[in-house]
Amino acid sequence: MSKSNWNGSASWGTIEDPTGALEGRVLVVTAGSCASSEDYVTQVVGTSEAFSKANYKACAYYGFPTGTDEFAGGKFGVIARAGSLTGAPSTAQNCYIGLIDNEFNKYKIIKRYNGTDTVLAECDISPSALTAGYRHKIDLICTGSATVVSLKLQIDEATVLSVADNTSSVILTGFAGLYVESGTVYVDSFIIYEYTVDGLAPADWAPNNAATSLAMWLKHDTGITQASGTVSQWADQSGNANNANQATVNQQPEAVTGSGISSGTFLKFVSGGAGTEKHLTVTDTASLDLNASGLSIFAFIRPLTYGVNAGVSTVDIGYVVDKDTAYSFGTANDTAGSPANVKTLRSDLNTSVSGTVYAADNAIENLNTWYVSGLVSDISSAANTAVNGFFVNGAFSANSTTLGANTATDLIVGAKNSGALANMFNGYIAEIILFSGEVTTADRQKVEGYLSWKFGVEGNLPLDHPYRLYKPTV
């Protein structure tokens, strides 16, 4: 839990786990005799975006130390749809609360409206919910529209109460949070799972849900045509029919399955010399001419070298995608050329083959390692590091800048096209996503979350990334 995302209504602190059942340092959720305390998540974790969800499950993992009775008369619960915060410390005047009321030996679902609490449903507590030295879980699921709100209280995965609020004062949206009265509870995790209005888990977010239009989308698990272990076509999933093709068998990338990371097919680009330059070609179309709109490129790649020098460049570069002088994106190990960097991500966003190069120093630190890599161009040349630049595993690495002029050349996957093939990518490519515009920070992070969770590398995202702990959803 990030304290910065909470309202700060309660002055709860953290200590080393005294229960013997929780994980690491824990939050001490406490309130004195006949007093109550509550706090609310007011921002989406890892962002400055206000939390304004309506349908979700608020989940807390909690425990009690053995040999104590500090919760003998206590109450503990989770809060949903909290709003109208007033007072100091601020308290929600409207909310739903799923409550363990140990004073009266009841589970309760409470509705607070205009500061007045009303019990919507209750039943007797199971003693197992308060067992000391055990990691318990409490969930309050809150879903529904303006006419009926469905509420479900779960303890240790078992549903103990379910009720509907169909009054004229249903609460439509608001913060999630924690509540305690006359006792102390220790909490090691607070998680919010988003649902649909019907109470179903929402669909996973995908690149076609972004506000910026897709130009090309090559997926590892869809649209791959292969024979005898090589790939002749990688079909575009953007709707633009920007299919990547290779008719020459010796130049077709290898089709590899497994690789210890996901089901589906990975394309392996390892060239063996003249006539075997592994690459795919996408015929030039207006949907790939992005000088006016800007572009955003994302790829899930595993470079085996930083690039293969084909004799036309002093820099060892491996291009993931290239459209000659318009734009390109790849990896590089540049110890002699310009710029003099090593282990970089690299883009050419200029009007000539030898034009300015934009590089992210040491962005790709290790070979034979999977990376979520991305580039958001900067057609305004504003150098806004929150929006534009290179991003590796969700972290900003370096600035980018404006695009060059559009070209009539084809787009190449896995090599450079400047009249002759050069600078082949040497490694694996699992997915490429190209947007016809500069994606917002929110959508960039969703692309990073989509790729990371799809391929099981979400743990590589920064600790404050909004999708390190859960998938992006729609």
Image (cartoon, rainbow, N blue to C red):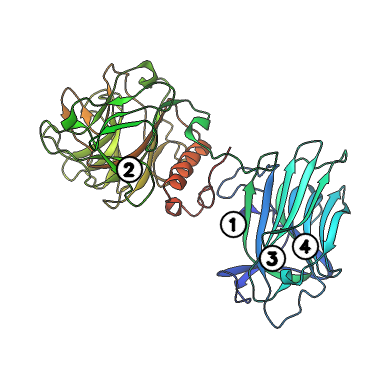
User: In the image, is residue 354 above or below residue 15?
Assistant: above
Residue 35's place in the image compared with 239, above or below, is: below
Q: Secondary structure at mark 4?
A: strand
Residue designated by label 4: 37
Horizontal and vertical percent for residue 316?
Answer: 18, 40
Q: CA distance from mark 1 to mark 4?
A: 18 Å
In this orientation, which residue lies closer to the viewer: 134 or 78?
134
Marks 3/4 in contact by CB < 8 Å: the verdict is yes
**Is tag 2's residue or tag 4's residue first in the polypeptide sequence?**
4
Q: If you read the primary sequence from the N terminus, does the residue marked by circle 3 or circle 4 appear first?
A: 3
Q: Which mark is residue 2?
A: 1
Q: Which residue is mark 2?
A: 301
SS for callout 2: strand
In the image, which disc is placed on residue 12? 3
Quadrant housing residue 435: top left
Q: Residues within 10 Å of mark 1 (few under 14, many from 20)?
A: few
Q: Amino acid at mark 2?
A: Ile
**Disc 1 and disc 3 in contact, CB within 8 angstroms:** no
- How much space separates mark 1 and mark 3, taking CA atoms? 13 Å
Residue found 13% across the figure and 35% down from its top: 310
Is tag 2's residue or tag 3's residue first in the polypeptide sequence?
3
The amino acid at mark 3 is: Trp
Distance from disc 3 to disc 4, alpha carbons, whole Å, reads 9 Å
Residue 188 percent coordinates (x, y): 61, 65
Q: Secondary structure at mark 3?
A: loop
Q: Nearer the viewer, mark 1 or mark 2?
A: 2
Give whichever of discs 1 and 3 has the lower sequence position. 1
Q: Is residue 394 above or below residue 78?
A: above
Residue located 32% across and 23% down the image: 404
Q: Crowding at label 4, few (<14), some or many (≥20) Cα neighbours within 10 Å?
A: many
- Which amino acid lies under the numbered mark 1 shown in the image of this protein? Ser
Quadrant of the rendering where the N terminus is positioned: bottom right
